[in-house]
Image (spheres, rainbow, N blue to C red):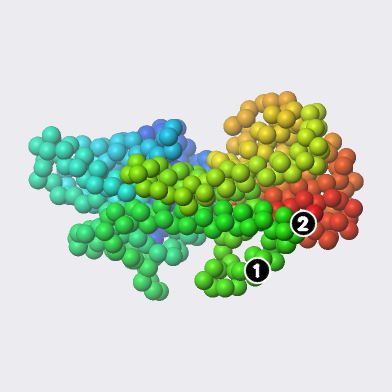
């Protein structure tokens, strides 16, 4: 099948590459000429396991191409997939201007019937807006005769395992009431729907809402656990034992109940805020969503507060080692990462940071540039040099089994503030290191 994908960001590029891998002919279009140029030379700006080879292999096989030419791109695909960004507006609502712009390009250029698929995370009602916008443009062109359908098809991939998630989706949500559109979409996804039925067809608005409800449910689990962790500390219980104790109930499950430093990334914070805003717009009281957001904002400060308390509020002139900058492992993404709140709080308090992350250092450099209170180090060991304490913000595998003897010998005051509960407190204590973690008594 010939497909066009608008937007070569995370979702668009991964989805395009995976669709090409199963044999579709995919043309990707983006307004960012530099990005398109780089992708046409197999240069991928984001770190995502497996993506580089997938794009390069499919490009050399001729199944995926990149262009900035919307006319050519619209002519290519029977199905036009919109996967452009929906950043947060200043007031927290989702900004859908890029989605509308992509739909307008399609309406301006199409001269054959098209199925238009909305894959970006968009507020409920956006597909209706796209439908009326496209109708208006077609009518203005005198091409009201051209048939089209708008399908909502939200994406559920996770950064760090995006390629695998896309190859083996848990479910494929299709929001449409058109039998023809459903048939084409089933054909498109047939290679991913082999072992058991994964396609769930529903009305457009429910499909749009499913995406928000899923992300907000997961964010709620995390905020709830973070609140329990805070309580566990005060009640002298161990949240890691409690986690196993409650996770064993299949109604709760073991997934997404890891306490930590709060959720970050490009999705949960933005989507929770957007749903709060959407609820506000229709005067719907949503205390749960607001509490999820409030807890998360607080959680990002928890590690800094522990550090500040340990040093009696006197952080000026001190240097801290920080392991982990990315918002989670296996990505170089630092959007809304807890590490940023931690670093910025330390800087405000007059301290400096020497940091290491296996992938996110170029991104950190891009965000903060050169500054005297930030040293980016080539190894996790180098980050410890001259530091008083070690802070851990991301649970990279390579941080899980360090030499505690080395940490103790290098740090000027041997203390670890672990935001991801990577270590057994008894083991750390045996090495003569003071240890703070999340939801476990000191
Ligand atoms: C999330 C969802 O998991 C995807 O299903 C969804 O498609 C995606 O958003 C999106 O809307 O595009 P992602 O943001 O890549 O994916 O990352 P997650 O693995 O979900 O982690 C989000 C945050 O929650 C991270 O900061 C992570 O550290 C935190 N988290 C996760 C916890 O603090 N505890 C947990 O138990 C799990």
Residue drawn at 78 percent across, 60 percent down: 424
Tag of residue 119:
none
Q: Residue at x 63, y 38 (%)?
A: 341
- The front one of 437 and 13 is 437
Tell me residue 301's x, y (percent). 65, 42
Disc 1 element: helix
Q: Earlier in the sequence, mark 1 or mark 2?
A: 1
Residue at image location 20% in from the left, 59% down from the top: 178
The residue identified by callout 1 is 244
Q: Is residue 39 visible?
A: yes
Q: Residue at x 72, y 47 (%)?
A: 392
The answer to which image quadrant residue 172 occupies is: bottom left
Placement of the C terminus among the 4 image quadrants: bottom right
Looking at the image, residue 94 lies above or below residue 228: above
The answer to whether the residue bearing label 2 lies less than 8 angstroms from the nearest atom of ligand 1 is: no
Measured as percent of width and height from the top left, residue 183 is found at 24, 63
In the rendered structure, the answer to whether residue 157 lies left or right of residue 434 reads: left
Residue 104 vertical position relative to residue 5 in the rendered view, above or below = above
How many numbered discs, if any? 2
- Mark 1 or mark 2, whichever is nearer to me: 2
Please provide percent x and percent y for residue 180. Answer: 19, 60
- Count residues near mark 1 (Cα–Cα under 10 Å), then give few for <14, some for 14-19, many for 20+: some
Of residues 159 and 31, the one drawn nearer to the viewer in this rendering: 159
Q: Is residue 341 left or right of residue 197?
A: right
Label 1–label 2 contact, CB within 8 A: no
Q: For this rendering, which residue is in front, 367 or 22?
A: 367
Q: How far separated are the C-alphas under marks 1 and 2?
A: 17 Å
Q: Secondary structure at mark 2?
A: loop
Quadrant of the image occupied by residue 186: bottom left
Residue labelled with disc 2:
441
Q: Position of residue 242 (x, y in %)?
A: 67, 66
């Amino acid at each position: 099948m010939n497909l066009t994908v608008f937007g070569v960001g995370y979702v668009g590029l991964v989805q395009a590459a995976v669709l090409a891998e199963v044999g579709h002919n995919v043309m990707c279009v983006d307004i960012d000429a530099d990005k398109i140029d780089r992708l046409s030379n197999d240069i991928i700006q984001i770190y995502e396991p497996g993506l580089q080879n997938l794009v390069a292999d499919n490009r050399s096989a001729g199944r995926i191409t990149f262009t900035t030419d919307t006319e050519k791109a619209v002519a290519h695909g029977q199905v036009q997939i919109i996967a452009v960004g929906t950043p947060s507006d200043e007031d927290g609502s989702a900004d859908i201007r890029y989605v509308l712009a992509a739909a307008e390009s399609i309406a301006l250029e199409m001269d054959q019937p098209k199925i238009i698929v909305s894959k970006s995370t968009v507020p409920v009602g956006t597909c209706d807006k796209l439908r009326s916008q496209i109708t208006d443009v077609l009518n203005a062109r005198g091409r009201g005769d051209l048939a089209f359908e708008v399908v909502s098809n939200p994406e559920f991939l996770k950064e760090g395992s995006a390629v695998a998630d896309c190859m083996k989706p848990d479910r494929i949500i299709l929001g449409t009431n058109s039998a023809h559109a459903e048939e084409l979409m089933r054909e498109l996804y047939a290679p991913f729907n082999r072992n058991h039925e994964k396609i769930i067809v529903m009305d457009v608005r429910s499909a749009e809402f499913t995406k928000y409800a899923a992300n907000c449910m997961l964010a709620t689990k995390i905020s709830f656990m973070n609140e329990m962790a805070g309580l566990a500390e005060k009640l002298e219980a161990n949240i890691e034992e409690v986690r196993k104790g409650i996770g064993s109930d299949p109604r709760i499950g073991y997934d997404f109940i890891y306490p930590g430093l709060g959720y970050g990334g490009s999705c949960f914070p933005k989507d929770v805020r957007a749903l709060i805003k959407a609820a506000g717009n229709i005067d719907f009281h949503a205390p749960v969503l607001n509490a999820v957001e409030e807890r998360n904002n607080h959680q990002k400060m928890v590690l800094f507060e522990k550090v500040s308390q340990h040093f009696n509020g006197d952080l000026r002139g001190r240097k801290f080692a920080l392991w982990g900058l990315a918002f989670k492992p296996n990505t170089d993404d630092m959007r809304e990462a807890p590490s940023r709140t931690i670093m910025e709080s330390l800087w405000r308090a007059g301290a400096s940071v020497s940091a290491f992350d296996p992938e996110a250092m170029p991104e950190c450099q891009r965000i903060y540039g050169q500054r005297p209170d930030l040293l980016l180090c080539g190894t996790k060991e180098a980050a410890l040099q001259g530091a008083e304490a070690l802070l851990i913000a991301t649970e990279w595998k390579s941080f899980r089994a360090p030499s505690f003897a080395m940490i103790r010998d290098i740090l000027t005051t041997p203390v670890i503030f672990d935001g991801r509960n990577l270590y057994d407190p008894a083991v750390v204590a045996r090495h003569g290191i003071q240890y703070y973690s999340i939801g476990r008594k000191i």
